[in-house]
Amino acid sequence: MSHPLIDDNGDGRGRDAGQPGADGLTATRLILGAWLDEAESITDPVLLPCCQAAGVAADRGRDLKAGKNEMTPEAYLRELEGVLVDLARVSRQI
């Protein structure tokens, strides 16, 4: 069973959503994948490849989640980290 915690300040200590603490300020301002539904209407030649790359990473994340039960926890976390890093890099470019 998963028990996600919010740790968006990098101190290695998370907190449960809805509980007081320093974590969560970044998460309230960022929604990964929020631009993906709008990617079809983007015409900016710089922004379009970024949104397409985000879509590819989001698809990888969905595929990874679907196959989670066939993976070791370590392999799943390693792959998940790669997906999240890719999404973060693209988000920074956007």
Image (cartoon, rainbow, N blue to C red):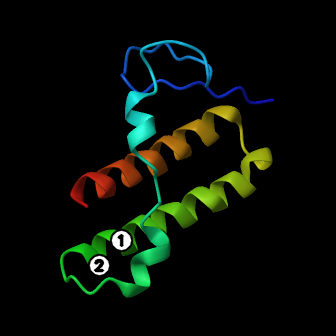
Foreground pick, 79 / 30: 30
Local crowd at mark 2 within 10 Å, few (<14), some, or many (≥20)?
some
Q: Report the residue at 40% width, 54% height from top.
A: 87
**Number of residue marks:** 2
Tell me the residue that label 2 is attached to. 48
33 up-or-down from 52: above or below: above
Q: Residue 6's x, y, as percent?
A: 53, 26
58 up-or-down from 20: above or below: below
Q: Are marks 1 and 2 in contact (CB under 8 Å)?
A: yes
Which image quadrant: the N terminus?
A: top right
Q: Report the residue at 41% width, 65% height from top.
A: 54
The label shown at residue 51 is 1
Q: Amino acid at mark 1?
A: Cys
Local crowd at mark 1 within 10 Å, few (<14), some, or many (≥20)?
many
Q: Report the residue at 39% width, 28% height from top.
A: 25
Secondary structure found at label 2: helix
**Image check: 21 left or right of 64?**
left
Foreground pick, 73 / 31: 31
Q: Quadrant of residue 11?
A: top left
**Image check: 43 left or right of 14?**
left
Q: Amino acid at mark 2?
A: Leu
